[in-house]
Amino acid sequence: MTASNPSPGFTTALVHADRRAGIEHGAIRKPIHTSVQYGFERVEDLIGVFQGTVKGGFNYARQGTPTTAALEARITQMEDGIGSITFGTGMAAICAVFLTLLKQGDHVVSSQFVFGNTNSVLGTLGQFGIEVSKVDVTSVDAVRTALQPNTRMVFVETLANPGTQIPDLEGIGQLCAERGLLYVVDNTITSPWLFRPKAVGASLVIHSLTKTIAGHGTALGGSVTDTGLFDWSRYPNIFPAYRSGDSRQWGLAQIRKKGLRDMGAALSSEQAHAIASGAETLALRVNHASATALRLATFLAEHPAVAKVHYPGLSDHPQHERARKLFKAGAWLLSFELRDANRLVEVINRLNVVIKATGLGDTRTLIIPVAPTIFWEAGAETRARMGIADGLIRLSIGLEDADDLIADLGQALA
Ligand SMILES: *Cc1c(COP(=O)(O)O)cnc(C)c1O
């Protein structure tokens, strides 16, 4: 980046983000701060950190460290938000949003195609007296129909796993803006490189940093970013303690204080550093894996042993035009159905390069048969309702050369 370029590109801004903060000894990478406690010369500053009048201060690592703060700044920059909070996992970030911003008697409209563990949390909300409607978010009409006077929040994922459905992200954004609803978008699979939810009016953006952003399968983490678009002064569930000062900060203040303090699912400095290092290659990795995914999807779609391929980059995907309009590329997640579900085990066992493992967004390509694993607990009825066929296989595309992956799948399917 040159000083004369006022708006550097995505990756330039990303790799130079931390050194701008004036790191000691001229280090060009932010170090890992391992201290749990933070001391002060003057007790007034300790008091100020507690009362929030000293900005950017630290007191106890459960609430954040300089290393998690540096990662939060990077995520905020990538998502063009006003602030972010990191958590120990993506699930912790999702739980923090639901449990700190909703209360008994509230209603949430959620996508019916959410990540399995998120679905599990939505079930738990019901036990606390929070109603959840699960709808087909590929159409905004389904969301509109589900709205109730007590609806507070609409929750969607940009690109569903394993079916790759894409919500009417723009239509839902407009609806939420009209009705003053909190619009929460899980951008884990697409990442801010392929799509910025702020562009469609998202209030909060969630990530499992474990996946696309960290990208190397060596760190767990999660985040919540406030885009600055939501008017918290009109949100009834902000506690009196957080209703002071700039109302744009109220939501994050409550999620940080209640989410990190009460739930305690803090991200460690070591993991934050690993995630920040992984994030530097986000655009390069996602471009490569998306190009590979498109080639593989095209190969599989033409293969006689394959009944169906789910990938938004293919022209027969139901939301192909939406993906083209909103996303830079089709991302690195695809699934396909074998014509003969009885061959599931045999085909997968023949693979040599692709790894038989759960998980997403690794440098290695991972494969998993969906019905007998991640959707086993859901039961046959739910699988049928969600369109999960017995022969459905999910692929998380890594960084291997496309030719090697095509050859491996080709010999396995033959
Ligand atoms: C994996 C995942 C999560 C949960 O993240 P963890 O870091 O594994 O807890 C949430 N949302 C989506 C879309 C995911 O793929």
Image (tube, rainbow, N blue to C red):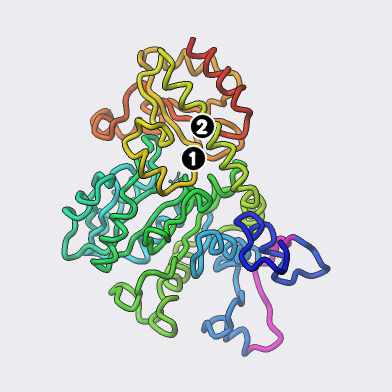
The label on residue 293 is: 2
Residue type beneath disc 2: Ala
- Location of residue 94 (image quadrant): bottom left
Whether label 2 lies within 8 Å of ligand 1 gets the answer no
Distance from label 1 to label 2 (Cα)? Answer: 7 Å
296 in the magenta segment: no
Q: Position of residue 33 (x, y in %)?
A: 70, 64
Q: Could you say whether the residue bearing mark 1 is in a helix, strand or loop? A: loop
Q: Give the residue displayed 46% in from the left and 27% down from the top.
A: 297
Which residue, as the protein is rendered here, is positioned at the far front?
A: 4
Q: Which residue is mark 1?
A: 331
Nearest to N terminus: mark 1 or mark 2? 2
Name which quarter of the figure residue 70 lies in.
Answer: bottom right
Q: Amino acid at mark 1?
A: Ala
Q: Residue at x 49, y 31 (%)?
A: 294
Give the magenta-colored segment's residue range: 29-43
